[in-house]
Structure formats: structure tokens, C-alpha cells
Amino acid sequence: MDLSKALEGIEKLFLEILGYLLPGVALLYLTSFCLRETTLTLPFDVATMNEWLLVALAYLLGYLVYGVALVRDTLYESAVLRLWSKIRKKEIKSDRLAVFDRVNESFEIEVSRRILSDLLAHVVPDVPDRIEKMNVQGVRNLAMSYVPQSDRKVYTFMFRADLCDHLSVVALVLGAWGILSCVSGSVFGMQLILSTKDSFLYSYLLLIVATYFLHKTRIRFLGISMSIPFSMFIAEYHKLEGKNG
């Protein structure tokens, strides 16, 4: 058995668990904090909870956060931005989709398409047209299949992007919910579960600010994870060409 591949597999498993565990832990502790000095509490005490039970619960909640992130992106891109585009009478894309567009227009993917067309020209007659019509993810996956060593680097940056995304969901939901609860308490005298004291309001505002920075970090890492396979593919191809030449 190849030890390096085994270690790489263990690393991926560890990052996958960590990617769901950390957002779940953040959700548990932040929710517990936001419920302080209210009539409602969690059905368990996070501080005194059994460690393994806490890990298991946080891991499961991490999947819930992941699902909420998918729904948020779908609603934002298919509903909010589509409506805003109609109002502004021009297409407006999310930062996430803008990353795909930038990569699709980059020099690296253009060169990669040409290399892939040459490599696969003997397989299908119209392969250049097919590759030209493929989206960024399709070309990226095809390029990565020729450079398996890129998988580790790509996975690392994708892990960072997803982690920032999931943490931003936790911050956004609790921050927005908390601010809404404070407004509701001040205007209507209704407390929407979370604490409405002034000190907590500052915490909610900090969570909203954190959402912005986590989002920007996510987009940064997403861009790297989407573009780096093409650079490695081009370098590997020319290295092989030099040996064959």
C-alpha cells in the first residue's frame, strides 16, 4: 500500500470532518451565548456536555449549515439577483458566479482547452467544439484528471472556501436574527427568542460584519481552487513535451 496515498486519504477525511464540525461547534456555542439572560435555553448545557456527544451533535449540525448555505446561494442567485437584474435592466451576478466567469475568461483556461483538444482529438472528431462548450467545472475536472497531484492543493483551498462559507452562514443567521429580535423588542415589545440587551446588539452587529469578511475570504480561496488546476496542467503538459522532445 502506498503510504503517501494513505496519508493523503486520512488528511482528506480529517478535513472533511473538520469542515462540518467547526461550523456546528460555532452554531452551538453562539446560539448558547445568544440565549443567555432569556427565558429560553438549549435542552442541554454546552459547557458541561459530554465531549463525544458534543462532537457528534456539532458534526450533524454542520451538515444542516451546509444545506442552509446551498439554499441561500440558490435563493440569492435565482431570485434576489434575478429580480435586481430586472430592476436595473442589466445582468447582475453573485461573487461566486463572477469567480467562474473570471476563470472562464482567463488565459490559463484558454490554453488548457487547446491542450485538451489536442490530447483528445483522436477520441472524438468534434472534440474541440465539445471542450469549447464545456463549463468551467467540466474543463477543470478534465484537466485535473491529467494532473492527479493537483487534487491535494485544490482540496485544501476548497476546504478553506467551504469553511468560510459555512461559518458566514452561522454568523449571518444569528446576527440577522438577533438584530431583528432587538428591533422587534424595542418597537413591538416582542422578543424573538434571542437576547435583546444592548450588549448583545453589539455582538449581533459584529456577527454581520464577520459575515462580510468571511464571504470575501471564501471568494478568494474559491478563485484559487478553481484556477490552480489549469496552471498545474499546463506546466505538467509542457514538462512532458520537453521530455518527449
Image (tube, rainbow, N blue to C red):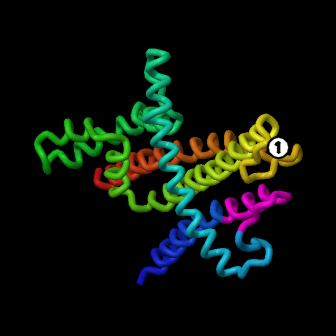
Quarter assignment of residue 213? top right
Residue at point 79% right, 78% down? 48
Is 11 situated left or right of 117 in this image?
Answer: right
Q: Position of residue 28 (x, y in %)?
A: 69, 64
Residue 29 as seen in the image, left or right of residue 242: right
Q: Residue at x 37, y 41 (%)?
A: 136
Residue plotted at (70% across, 71% down): 43
Which region of the structure is painted magenta? 25-42
**Relative to 53, 194 lies left or right:** right
The tally of labels here is 1
Q: Nearer the viewer, residue 61 or 214?
A: 61
Residue position marked by numbered label 1 in the rendering = 201
Local secondary structure at mark 1: helix
The type of residue carrying mark 1 is Leu
Instruction: Give how far across and how far down residue 112 sits, in percent.
Output: 34, 42
**Front-most of 231 and 225?**
225
Residue 107, image quadrant: top left
Q: Residues within 10 Å of mark 1 (few under 14, many from 20)?
A: many
Q: Which quarter of the image is occupied by the N terminus?
A: bottom left
203 up-or-down from 85: above or below: below
Q: Relative to 238, is 87 above or below?
A: above
